[in-house]
Image (tube, helix red, strand yellow):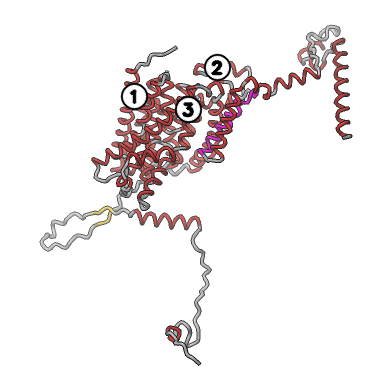
Amino acid sequence: MKNIFRLLFISLLLFITNNVFAQENDAQPVVDETAVTEEVMAIAETADTEAVATEEYVEEDIHFGESIVKFLQRTGLSQLVDHWKAIIMLLVSFLLFYLAIVKGYEPLLLLPIAFGMLLTNLPGAEMYHSEYFAEGHVHWECFRNGAGLLDFLYLGVKLGIYPCLIFMGVGAMTDFGPLLANPKSLLLGAAAQLGIFVTYFCSIAMGFLPNEAASIAIIGGADGPTAIFLTSRLAPHLLGPIAVAAYSYMALVPVIQPPIMRLLTTKEERKIQMVQLRSVSKTEKIVFPVMVTVVVSLLLPDATPLIGCLMFGNLLRECGVTERLSKTVQNELMNITIIFLGTTVGATATADAFLNLKTLGILAVGIVAFGMGSAAGVLLAKLMNLFMKNKINPLIGSAGVSAVPMAARVSQTVGQEENPRNFLLMHAMGPNVAGVIGSAVAAGIMLSMMGS
Amino acid sequence: MTLAINWGNAVIIAVLGISVVFCILVLLIFVISMFGKIMAPKIKVEKKAPVAANVSTNEKAAPEFEDVHIAGIETAAIATAIHLYFNDVHDSESYVMTIKSTQRRYSPWNSKIYGLNNNLVRK
């Protein structure tokens, strides 16, 4: 108790002295000598001694009560009252934390996204300003007036740097061997892109503009970096909801795909055992990335950033002489980029951008895109079985939506439910990596048709 | 403001888009297949030619080759063995012989007494 009284007494003393000094200051404004600049001092030395100070800095009076009120007004708590939408966004970010940490839904990306969302919706923090990137281009002049950390980091998304770096890492981690051994699996990867174009129709019907519809439709490609790359070019204001939808649905692939796969296939079809894949030479693996880059870039230059980076990463892996670079791209570079990308994409999910009917529409259409892509892959595999000598298991068709390697694992799991001796994983990896190429090509097409 | 939907444009974009995706990937299939034919590893062994009495010595038949690829089960076994070897999860042996020779002429291992059913003997 004694200590409490002592503290109260000291604070009261401070308050009184502060007020007394404040009154004295009112009477005699004090010249702050330290505020005189060096330039003025130099002039003062050479000039007449009487004309010393040319500018005087007068410090404003500080009142204890006013200071406290000002401080309280500047706290986020008081601003939360005016920004009730921010409270909802904070709750959404907490939900994403739960999904990432407890449920393990794509935690590597969902967690940074959730934290970016948390930072951007804390009132008064001023970490991210959407107006600096309004109307589809960067307002560089605003950066001179002061920008938040996330504003600077977001430049990597806006300029299309992060998705390409991630694609480089994906390429370095991907083995295209199963695709080279069975090139027909590229068809399944193409079929799965049907979901993108069907969803484009749905989005247009729901009233989205063509550029917005294209950005939403690319969710069907189940490829996060591609979705972010295209959206940042075509509809940057929808980046937050689209990224959240894309990564959430990618995490839900084991939930979304199996019912569709079972619905579209018979028991006998799911039991089909596929023939052993042929072995692939090292030369093939080295030539493949160079060849794909040349072919795709010549036909579709808009897809070059994504395809080029994907194949560059793969060449680093396969050539065998750049092991250090390959490891760096797979690990350090990839991880750093994921942190920056996730946080900044999450930061775009401000209350105004996220809490509207468009977001609900995106979430609804996104799941249609996923379902349609999976279904199209399975159906084309069934169609191919009508003409092929060596039957393919239709379950590998659903892996044509990218989501590497989750979609391939789902094919393996569903296949083994019917036939425990069936190993579809390597067969499904073919369409799976073909889906990555397919979605990058689809993004390139969208960009060439709608990009400025 | 309600925007009129231009369905014509939407159809063109969708049809053209999916067609271009298929065209590019089909082209890649051809190119990959072509490269595969040239560069695929060929593990071939010469077939033993059957002894033909009527074949003249001048007209030697070209040796027949058969493609030999390791079967999936064998690949799996090799992969498992390599995995176990590199991860050091195989059983470690102490390299100590635990079976020792014995000098006894009869032991429980070779005594027929232990292999017979002994009837109960009332004493």
Q: For the residue labelled by badge 3, is the local secondary structure a helix, a strand or a loop?
A: helix
Work out which residue is located at the far left of the displayed protein and give it. B54
**Subunit bearing disc 3:** A
Q: Which mark is residue B14?
A: 1
Q: For the residue labelled by badge 1, is the local secondary structure a helix, a strand or a loop?
A: helix
**Are the numbered discs 1 and 3 placed on the same chain, yes or no?**
no
Q: CA distance from mark 1 to mark 3?
A: 20 Å
Residue highlighted by disc 2: A139
**Subunit bearing disc 1:** B
Residue A15 visible in the shown view: yes
Closer to viewer: mark 3 or mark 2? 3
**Subunit bearing disc 2:** A
Magenta residue check for A107: yes
Work out which residue is located at the far front of the displayed protein and give it. B122
- Residue name at image x 76 percent, y 14 percent: A39
Please give left or right for residue A78 compared with residue A66 in the image. Answer: left
Mark 1 touches mark 3? (CB < 8 Å): no
Report x, y in % for residue A377: 34, 36
Q: For the residue labelled by badge 2, is the local secondary structure a helix, a strand or a loop?
A: loop
Q: Does residue B58 sit above or below A386 in this rendering?
A: below
Mark 1 crowdedness (10 Å alpha carbons): few <14, some 14-19, many ≥20: many
Please give left or right for residue A145 compared with residue B75 in the image. Answer: right
